[in-house]
Amino acid sequence: MADFGVTEVIGIMALVGSAVGAGLQYSAAKSASADQSNLALMNAQAASQEANQQGKLGMMQAQINSQIADGERRAALANVDGYKQEAEAGTSATQINVQKTREDFSRMLAAQRVQAASSGVVDTTGSPLDLMTQTAEQEQRTVDTYRYQDETQRRSLFHEADNETRNSKLSGISALSAMSQGYAAQGRALSSISQSRLNLYGARAQSNAMSTQANAGLISSAGGIAGSAYSLYRSTPRTASNLATS
């Protein structure tokens, strides 16, 4: 065997220390690589869950807003029908009033003719004619008033119906807009989930690079230690008996 002096012992201890240091450095690098990979996975899972939750909340809110808008649309359409029905009912009532008014004035004119005849006065001249003319004019004014009021009311009601029709269309647009916002929220959620996955893949790639670097460092350290050991071996003095047996 070779006789080791102080220098050789120190060299051997240095080699052992280098090996231990390389092992510790390799272990630390591998641990850091694993920690980074696990942390990236947890971050990706948390980001995906948050994005998914935000997407669901966005869609839920959009559905609520869409239902509210759709309810307003249906209410507006119901108001349209109500205004139109009210207009038609008013016109029907006016027609009845006109007919009743004409019947009343017809009976009044008949009574005036009977009264004039019983008085021996001809109803085609003089005061009887003026009275019946005034009665006929009053009848027409009353009928015209009924029809004017009905036409004014109809126009007002149909104007309100047109407004409600516009409101129903706007509410329908609001419902579609709300759903579009919900789909946009889901789209943003999917985009965030995709981005979190890309971040995970990038972090894993860095982790793999760290692991590969640790392996390369260990191999490099092993090669350096082996070279140092060989150099130490070459420089160690040998006795004649060692040389004979080597």
Image (cartoon, grey):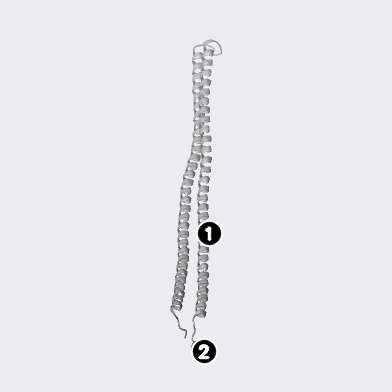
Question: Circle 2 is placed at which residue position?
Answer: 244
Number of dots carrying numbers: 2
Nearer to us of marks 1 and 2 is 2
Report helix, strand or loop for mark 1. Answer: helix
Which residue is rendered at x = 53% and y = 30% of the image? 155
Would you place residue 173 above or below residue 151 in this image?
A: below
Near-viewer residue (116 or 125): 125
Q: Which mark is residue 156?
A: none
Near-viewer residue (200 or 232): 232
Near-viewer residue (137 or 19): 19
Would you place residue 190 above or below residue 117 in this image?
A: below
Near-viewer residue (209 or 174): 209
Would you place residue 126 above or below residue 226 in this image?
A: above
Residue 98 at what x, y percent from top left? 51, 26
Amino acid type at circle 1 is Leu
Would you place residue 40 above or below residue 75 in this image?
A: below
Q: How far apart, in angstroms, are the residues tagged by discs 1 and 2?
A: 66 Å
Residue 132 at what x, y percent from top left? 52, 16
Amino acid type at circle 2 is Ala
Residue 112 at what x, y percent from top left? 50, 16
User: Few, some or many C-alpha atoms within 10 Å of disc 1 (few <14, some 14-19, many ≥20)?
Assistant: few
Report helix, strand or loop for mark 2. Answer: helix
Which residue is rendered at x = 53% and y = 54% of the image? 191
Question: Circle 1 is placed at which residue position?
Answer: 198
Q: Quadrant of residue 12?
A: bottom left
